[in-house]
Image (cartoon, rainbow, N blue to C red):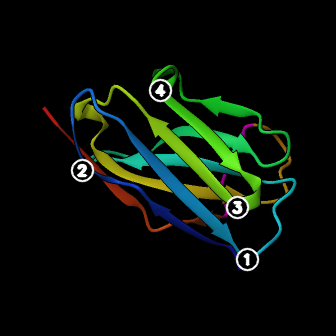
């Protein structure tokens, strides 16, 4: 059973930065991937970024490129999402998700999800 725990959310002013963390446990990750998603009130969940556990290849939603950076620390089983130049529109609950036994890149679906961490950007 894979468990994902997000942290690092909070309240920040527009233009500020936050770094979210996703600690994964329950298996030794290899041919897997972890992605970040977000869901704002009244909106559908949207993809933000993903990273392959082996090799570190990354993939971003086009609108997130340049401001958001996904990375991982294999030794800590942790994936990060560095968010810079935050805007009020970035306000959402941010989730990390794991895709096991990767077949294609980027993943079309994810198997496990965390509980989410709230990010609020004030204007």
Residue at mark 2 to residue at mark 1: CA–CA distance: 31 Å
Q: Residue furthest left?
A: 123
Label 3 neighbour load within 10 Å: few <14, some 14-19, many 20+:
some
Position of 23 with respect to 104 (left or right) is left
**On screen, 90 above or below 35?**
above
The span picked out in magenta is: 106-111
Q: Earlier in the sequence, mark 4 or mark 3?
A: 4
**Residue bearing the label numbered 2:** 41
Q: Earlier in the sequence, mark 3 or mark 1?
A: 1
Q: Position of residue 86 (x, y in %)?
A: 31, 31
Residue 26: which disc? 1
Label 1 Cα crowd, 10 Å radius (few <14 / some 14-19 / many 20+)? few
Q: Are marks 1 and 4 in contact (CB under 8 Å)?
A: no
Sequence order check, earlier mark of 2 and 1: 1
Q: Nearer the viewer, mark 2 or mark 1?
A: 1
Query: Which residue occupies the foreground of this view, 8 or 52?
Result: 8
| Residue holding disc 4 | 64
Q: Earlier in the sequence, mark 1 or mark 4?
A: 1
Place of residue 38 in the rendered image (x, y in percent of width and height, measured from the top left) = 42, 47
Task: Please name whichever residue, 103 or 85, is drawn nearer the observer in this view of the structure.
Answer: 85
Read off the residue under disc 3.
Answer: 77
Name the residue at 82% across, 41% down: 104
């Amino acid at each position: 059973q894979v468990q994902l725990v997000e942290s690092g959310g909070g309240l920040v002013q527009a233009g500020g930065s936050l770094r979210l963390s996703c600690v994964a446990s329950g298996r030794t990750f290899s041919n897997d991937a972890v992605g970040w998603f977000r869901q704002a009130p009244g909106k559908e969940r949207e993809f933000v970024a993903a990273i392959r556990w082996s090799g570190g290849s990354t993939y971003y939603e086009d609108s997130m490129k340049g401001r958001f950076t996904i990375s991982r620390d294999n030794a800590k089983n942790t994936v990060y999402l560095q968010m810079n130049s935050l805007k009020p529109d970035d306000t959402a609950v941010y989730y990390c998700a794991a895709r096991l036994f990767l077949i294609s890149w980027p993943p079309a679906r994810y198997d496990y999800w965390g509980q989410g961490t709230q990010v609020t950007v004030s204007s």
